[in-house]
Image (tube, rainbow, N blue to C red):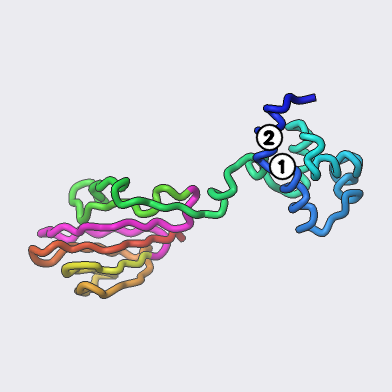
Amino acid sequence: MISKTLEKELSAYRIGEKVKELRTERGLRLVELGSHTGMSAAMLSKIETGKLVPTLPTLMRIALVFSVGLDYFFGDERRRKAFAITRKGERIKLPAALDKKLVPYDFESLDYAALEPKLNAFLATFRELERLPSHQHNGVEFIYLISGRLEITWSGTAHVLEAGDSVYFDSGVEHGYRRLGKDECTGVVITLPG
C-alpha cells in the first residue's frame, strides 16, 4: 500500500492512461496484453484505471511489449512533442571557428531549448574576411539573409546574396561564406544532418 502523497504524485504521470493508449493503438485486448506480459487481465485493468500503481519491473514488462522505454511513462510529454521556445534575451552569441583559424560568423542558437532537435537553426552575424574559409559536413543547409550582402562559395563557384535572398544546398560539398562590405550582414541558417 502506498501513501496518499505518493499516490497523488504518481497520478500526475498518468501511467495507467498511457498503458491503455498504447494497448488500444496496437489493437490489443487486455487478455492479449496479459498473454504477452504474463499478467492477468484483471491486474492490467487495475493499472489502466489507476487503481493499482505498477512496480518498475511490472511496468518494464509492459514497456517491452510496446518497444518503449520507461521514459515514455515518466518523461515530460510536452518535451516529447518537440516544442521549445527560445527567447531573444536567452541567446548567447558565440564565434563559429569552422577551421579553427578564421571565424566566418558569430552565431546564436535558435533551437537550443529543444530536446533531440531534428535540425539546427541559428542566427548568424557574418564577418568580413580577406580569405573565404571553406568547410563541408553531411546533410543540407538553408540560409535566409536578413540584412547585408553575403558571398557564398559552393563547389568552387561564388554567389552573392542580398537581403531577402535565400539559398538551399548540399552541405556535403565544400562551401564557405563571408560578409561583403561594411554593413552588418545577418541571416537565419538551418542545417539538417544527413
Please tell me whether mark 1 sits on a helix, a strand or a loop.
Answer: helix
Q: Position of residue 153 (x, y in %)?
A: 24, 68
Residue on which disc 2 sits: 10
Residue on which disc 1 sits: 15
Within the image, what quadrant is residue 136 found in?
bottom left
* Figure check: 176 above or below 89: below
* Figure check: 148 above or below 3: below
**Rendered residue at 9%/66% (across/down):** 181
For the residue marked with disc 2, what is the amino acid? Leu
Contact (CB < 8 A) between labels 1 and 2?
A: yes
Q: Main secondary structure of the magenta part?
A: loop
Crowdedness near tag 2: few (<14), some (14–19) or many (≥20) residues, C-alpha within 10 Å: some
* Figure check: 168 above or below 39: below
Q: Position of residue 27 (x, y in %)?
A: 82, 59
Any mark on residue 189, and which? none
Tell me which label, 1 or 2, sits earlier in the chain: 2
> In the image, is 24 to the left or to the right of 152?
right
* Figure check: 160 above or below 29: below
Q: Is residue 158 visible?
A: no
Q: Quote the CA–CA distance across marks 1 and 2.
A: 8 Å
Q: Position of residue 42 (x, y in %)?
A: 91, 41
User: Which stretch appears magenta?
Assistant: 115-140
> In the image, is 134 to the left or to the right of 7?
left
**Rendered residue at 68%/33% (across/down):** 8
**Rendered residue at 69%/28% (across/down):** 6
Within the image, what quadrant is residue 69 found in?
top right
**Rendered residue at 85%/42% (across/down):** 44
